[in-house]
Amino acid sequence: MNMVKSTSEILAFKILNRNVNNVWINWAIEMLMAGFDSENLLYLAGENEQTNQFELQKIADRALNELKLDYSDREIVIENYICYLLDEAILEKRSYESVLKNLKDLCIELDYESSLYDFYSLYFAQDDLKYSTHQWYWENANRENINQIIKDYFYKRKASCT
């Protein structure tokens, strides 16, 4: 059995200490539907994000442990999350703009992590070009080509994913 694709997002959320919310609950449901079975995965799938966060965290931790999911290598977890988000954009499950915003925010959250800095630059180049004809973040980007530059960069970066 293969893990559902969104597992990389869940592991990233875990190491980033994000709240357990509907993304986690939907992941648990997908995992159950994919044939994974664990007591705490079942509990998590039956919860809602209004449940006490402390309890949700305990259930989520136990579910991850029951599934023997390794999130000990922060760098690998973040890289897998980046690849997952790029795939989501390329497959048109999420907009390029929302993925770019998520990765820009993650870059800031991780103290301007170098592996994320291009996403930060592309986000602000695109943002500046919404209101101005000039931007200073990405060389040769303008209103006419910024969306294609972003798309090309996503494909290029996705090609480096394992």
Image (cartoon, rainbow, N blue to C red):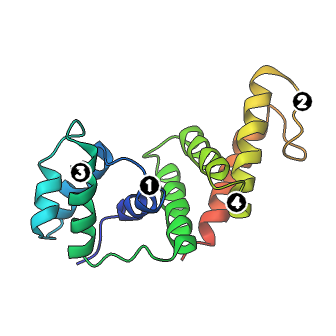
Mark pair 3, 2: CA separation = 46 Å
Which mark is first along the chain, 4 or 2?
A: 4
Mark pair 2, 4: CA separation = 25 Å
Disc 1: which residue = 17
Q: Residue at x 74, y 54 (%)?
A: 118
Disc 4: which residue = 113
The quadrant in which residue 143 appears is top right
- With respect to residue 121, does 15 lie above or below? below
* Residue type at tag 1: Asn
Mark pair 1, 4: CA separation = 17 Å
Q: Which of the numbered marks, if any, corresponds to residue 134?
A: 2
Please identify, in this view, whether the residue under mark 3 or under mark 2 is nearer the observer. 3
Please identify, in this view, whether the residue under mark 4 or under mark 3 is nearer the observer. 3
Q: Is residue 122 left or right of residue 95?
A: right
Q: Residue at x 26, y 74 (%)?
A: 65
Mark pair 1, 2: CA separation = 37 Å
Q: Which of the numbered marks, if any, corresponds to residue 56?
A: 3
Q: Secondary structure at mark 2?
A: loop
Number of numbered discs visible in the structure rendering = 4
